[in-house]
Amino acid sequence: MRIDDARSAAYDLLYEVGAGDAYANLVMPQIIEHYELAGRDAAFATELGFGTLRLRGMLDAVLARCADRTLSRIEPPVLDVLRMGAYQLLAMRVPSHAAVATSVELSGRVTLNNASGLVNAILRDVEPVAAMSAQYSHPAWQVRALTDALGARADELPQLLAINNTAPDVTLVARPGACTVDDLLQAAPAELGRWSPFAVRMQGVVPGALADVATGRAAVQDEGSQLVALALAAAPVEGPDDRWLDLCAGPGGKAGLLAALVAQRGGTLDAVEPQAHRADLVRKTLRGVPGRHRVHVADGTEFEGSFDRVLADVPCTGLGVLRRRPESRWRREPADIASLAPLQRALLRNAIECTRPGGVIAYSTCSPHIAETDLVIADAVAEGNIEVLDARAIALAIPGLRNVDEFDAATDAGPYLRLWPHRHDTDGMFLALLRRR
C-alpha cells in the first residue's frame, strides 16, 4: 500500500508544529500546496492533522494503555505516526486495516529505525476500541472510559453499549405521604418497579396526563435516582435527623423524594440551585410534596448551614444516562472531564462543610467515569474529617427494597454503590456515602 500524500501532509503538519513550533493554521495551507492536494484529499489531510492535534491528550492516554513502554521512550516521529493511526481508528471513518497498514508504512519513512512492528502491535490493540465504537455508535473515548469503569467486569462492555442504544421504560415515583404505588397502578397500565418500593414502570403512557403527576404527588424518576435518595435516607446518622440539604437540586427529582421522606420524620429539606429557572423547576416538582421545604437560588459551592444529611448530586458528563439522552454522547468531549473536576470537588468539599459531625453526605453522579467518581472521593478522604460508609450494604437494607437477592447478585462489592443499565436496568449511577467526623 502506497503512503498517500494526504497522510504525508498530515504528518508534516505534526512535525512542523512539534519540531518547528509552527502555527498549524498558518503552515497547513503551505503543506497542502506543496503536495498539490485539493478537494477530498485536502479535507482528509486537514481533518487528520488538526484532529490529531486537537485530541492529542486523549490519543496519548489510549496509546499509553496499549504500549508496552512509556510514550517518552518512543521516538517523536513514530509517536506522531501512532497518534495519527489512533485518530483514524477512533475518530474517523477509516477502515481499520487501512489505518494500521498506512501507519506501519509511514513509520518506515519517518525514522531510520525499524518501528513497523511496534506501530503494528500498538495500533492492533487500539483497534478493538475502534471496532466497538463503530458497532455500537459510541465515541471511542467513551468506550475506553466505560471499559475502565467496568473494571474486572470489562467483558460486559458489549451488553452495556448495546443497552445504551435502547429506549428505557418510563418510571414513576410515588412520593410517600402524597401518593401510593397502588394509586399509580390503578391510574394506568403499569407494573411494580424492579427495586424501589416507590417505583412503578409504565409503557405507552404520557406521564403528564396522570393526575398524580400533574399535581406533583408523583413524578417521573428513574429507579437508580430513587435508590440514591433512599440510600441517603437509610444511612445511619449520629444524633438528630431533621435537617436535610440537597446541594445541587435542579431539576428536582431527588429533592422531591427526599422532601417526602424527611417530612415523614418531621423535618425540613433545603434545596439549592444556582440557576433561577432551574430553581423554579424544583419549586414546581415540590408543589405536591407535604411538609416543609425551601428552595434557595444560590451557589452550592458557597452555601452555608449545618445539616444532618446532605446530597451532592454533582454535574457530570452523564455517561450513565446515554440511553435516556442519546444526543449527549456526541456533545460531550474528553475535555469535559477536566473542566467539571474542580466543580465536582468544590461541591463535595462544601457538602462536607455543611454537614454537622455525625451527619452523612451522599456524593452521586450519573456517570461511572473513574475521574468523576473514585478519584473525587479519594481526594476528599485525603483531606480528612470524613469516613467512607458501605453504600452498597446500606442500599441493600433500604426498607421495602424489592428483589433483594437479585439486587445483591447484580451489584459489585462496596463500599460504593454502582448501578448499571445492563445489570440493574436503571440509569448508570454512582453513590458514595460519607460520615462527617
Image (cartoon, helix red, strand yellow):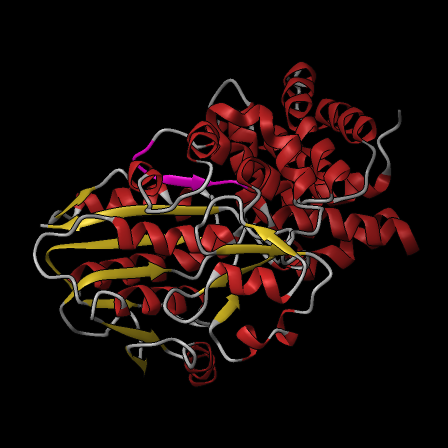
Between 64 and 359, the residue placed more toward the observer is 359
Between 281 and 230, the residue placed more toward the observer is 230
Asked whether, in this view, residue 369 is left or right of residue 56, the answer is left
Residue at the image position 45 percent from the left and 27 percent from the top = 409
Between 278 and 89, the residue placed more toward the observer is 278
Percent position of residue 99, x then y: 78, 31
The magenta stretch spans residue 123: no
Q: Is residue 170 above or below residue 275?
A: above
Q: Is residue 149 above or below residue 31?
A: above
Residue at the image position 61 percent from the left and 38 percent from the top = 143
Percent position of residue 210, x then y: 61, 73
- Name the image quarter holding residue 299: bottom left
**Quarter that holds the N terminus:** top right
* Residue 110 is at least partly visible in this image: yes
Tally of numbered discs: 0
Asked whether, in this view, residue 79 is left or right of residue 117, the answer is left
State the extent of the magenta-drawn residues as a range.
414-420
Percent position of residue 96, x then y: 79, 30
The magenta stretch spans residue 419: yes
* Residue 37 is at least partly visible in this image: no
Q: Is residue 115 above or below residue 102?
A: above
Between 330 and 241, the residue placed more toward the observer is 241
Percent position of residue 98, x then y: 83, 29
- Name the image quarter holding residue 134: top right
Residue at the image position 27 percent from the left and 70 percent from the top = 263
* Residue placed furthest toward the right: 39
